Amino acid sequence: VDPVSVSVQAGDALIVVDVQNDFLSGGNLRVPAGEEVVPVLNRYISEFSHNHLPVFATRDWHPPDHCSFSARGGGWPPHCVAGTRGAEFVPELALPETATIISKAARAEQDAYSGFDGTNLHRELRHRDVHRLFIGGLATDYCVLNTVRDALSSGYEVFLLIDAIRAVDLKAGDGVRAVDDMLRRGARPVDLQSVATASSAEN
Ligand SMILES: [Zn+2]
């Protein structure tokens, strides 16, 4: 995948997907190598903050009896129960105080892989005149995939942070297939260099 060069500008927002303790090592639903996205996302966060551009962070925010949990016949171990340490953002993630937090799947009977599903994310973005989204986080083959799909179908231009995503890969190749799917639908791949280079060339 060849990253495209792009400079961040007014109308852009960064969406950090589900970088929560339960998805990293020691958590209840570990994404392999998930911790590797944290320092990379921190660089993107700093780039957006420097440019006074909005940063959003989504999180799974489940009640203890959530329908996605195995005890209820769902496919996952209990994870990201609202108010627990597992649901907190990873402490190393340097979210600015101004970041907008989007909680999803907060009702027992509703699951949501997309940050747009059942939340006010779209309204918040429109309110701030955002039309391009830079999306990274966890996991490539679930919440990143579905957030990107919804963003594209809602009319946003989407840049996928290919150096700041990691997959669950329940089936080998799920992550690669998810990236293919997102790019085929129109997301454009970027990495730190292709974003940072373009923006520092302006200075
Ligand atoms: Zn969940």
Image: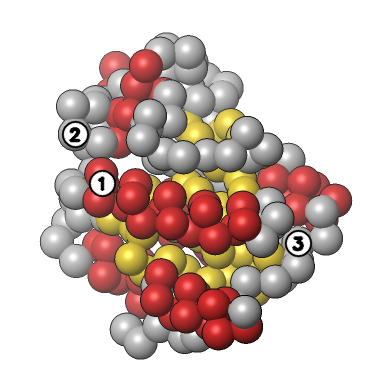
Neighbourhood count class around disc 2 (C-alpha, 10 Å): few under 14, some 14–19, many 20 upward: some
What residue sits 61% from the left and 46% below the top? 56
What residue sits 80% from the left and 48% below the top? 123
What residue sits 55% from the left and 85% below the top? 201
Give the structural element (helix, strand or loop) at label 1. helix
Q: Residue furthest front?
A: 203
Q: Residue 163's x, y, as percent? A: 33, 66
What residue sits 69% from the left and 45% below the top? 121
Disc 1 residue type (three-letter) = Gly
- The residue wearing badge 3 is 130
Q: Coloring scheme of the render? A: secondary structure
- Indicate if the residue with disc 3 has its beta carbon within 8 Å of ligand 1: no
Q: Residue 100's x, y, as percent? A: 66, 38
Kindly report the distance in space between the C-alpha atoms of the residues bearing marks 1 and 2.
8 Å
Q: Is residue 45 left or right of residue 131?
A: left
Q: Residue furthest left?
A: 172
Disc 3 residue type (three-letter) = Val
Q: In the rendered structure, find residue 25 and report the number of the disc placed on it.
A: 2
In the image, 131 versus 193, the foreground residue is 193
The quadrant of the picture occupied by the N terminus is bottom left
In this view, 143 is above or below 3: above
Q: Residue 72, located in which quarter of the rendered image? A: top left
The quadrant of the picture occupied by the C terminus is bottom right
Q: Residue 69's x, y, as percent? A: 34, 24
Disc 2 residue type (three-letter) = Ser
In this view, 37 is above or below 110: below
Q: Can you see residue 182?
A: no
- The residue wearing badge 1 is 34
Give the structural element (helix, strand or loop) at label 2. loop
